[in-house]
Image (cartoon, rainbow, N blue to C red):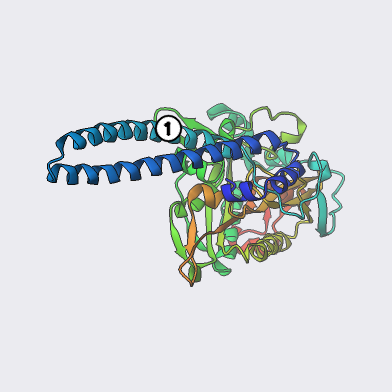
Amino acid sequence: MLQLSIIRENKQQVIDRLAVKNFNATLLVNEIITLDEQRRSTQKQLDDTLMRSKLIAKEIGNLFKSGQREEAEKKRAESLQLKNTAKELERNLNELIVSLNEKLVELPNLPHESVPPGNTDKDNEVIFEEGEIPELPETAVPHWELASQYGIIDFDLGSKVTGAGFPFYRGQGARLQRALINFFLDEAIKKGYLEYQPPLLINEDSGFGTGQLPDKEGQMYFVEEDKLYLIPTAEVPVTNIYRNVILQEEDLPVKNVAYSSCFRREAGSYGKDVRGLNRLHQFDKVEIVQIAHPDKSYNVLEEMKNQVAELLQKLELPYRILKLCGGDISFTSALTYDFEVYSAAQKRWLEVSSVSNFESFQANRMKLRFKNKEGKTRLAHTLNGSALALPRVVAALLENNQKEDGIYIPEALRPYTGFNKIVK
């Protein structure tokens, strides 16, 4: 959520920056400023009324002490009227605060000044590319056929037991999943991250804190009876560890990593681009989260970006990094880098990670603050990234490393799998 002071003091700049996200904020910003003026005016009236009521109460006491009963009764009537006025003002103030907050949560985060303009993912800016595209044998097939041939992923069984988008991993396929999770976690821990194993369900306050609610409730699975949501990513429970927390400046940056299953409804997703592992309703992911000092968060973003790139290098996957354009960046993000790996059998790029800086947007919703050395309290910056999401990484590993005699495992992963290749 944007800070009210920023909107009030930089009205046109806010409108212009949100236009980069293709969001016309003029009407909404004007409504917010009007409601804020009404709120402040009502607050002043309430404060003045309460102060006047307090002074009259003192006067009444003095009048009674001095025997001026008639005058005291007149003051008592005035005091009663002031109390009724205060109740009405307090009721109006609460209504204005609710209306103001409802409008504030409709505003997206401001994009960083480096975010390129654009409408769709076709306008994203490729800023880096590394790795050679593998040449596959004539017999090469996409990963969903490999999964069937080698018996490592069963999509039909998943559909039988649950539904489409919930595959079973078996044998070497299950071991490959476990190997990747442990590899990603170990690499993050080497870089100073503290590991968490978070809950897979969250309450409404947590969904609001990181911006999934009220923006993305249609994409999350909801347990009606308990009013809980299945997490779309470990970012949500891990970042919410610090909701309503005041950190010390010397504690920053806070670095956490977590593995979790992730659940997304992906409503309306269909077609060849979502076949196999390309889009699932349940998948595994290792997430890195940092709470950073506002003056250093973009250095932290670069550090996290380089960390994800290092993982893909060790997995020997050709990859590229994209800076998302205004039309493709998320509601909550100020700047996002997407990572894509090349799928040789599908002959296309597959997204495997997003690394984002949310600046103070999430922190303001969560009241996540830190106290600096002078004792002043400030909002922290939050960042997160996939390091990495498994499904499309697995798809690329299977497709790019298929040979006549099996599917070869990258060297860095072999200590974790316990085997060098997947065989039929």
Please name the residue that numbered disc 1 is placed on.
Answer: 227
Question: Residue 19, how many percent across, how many down?
Answer: 75, 41
Which amino acid does the dot numbered 1 rest on? Lys
Question: Residue 258, how many percent across, how many down?
Answer: 52, 55
**Which image quadrant: the N terminus?**
top right
For image coordinates 82% across by 47% down, the residue present is 344
Q: Secondary structure at mark 1?
A: loop
Q: Nearer the viewer, residue 192 or 6?
A: 6
Q: Nearer the viewer, residue 78 or 41?
A: 78
Question: Residue 64, how many percent across, how many down?
Answer: 14, 42
Horizontal side of residue 182 vs 327, given as left or right: left
Tag count: 1
Mark 1: few, some, or many residues within 10 Å (few <14, many ≥20)?
Answer: few
Question: Residue 149, how many percent across, how many down?
Answer: 70, 40
Q: Which quarter of the picture shows residue 139? A: top right
Q: Nearer the viewer, residue 263 or 305?
A: 305
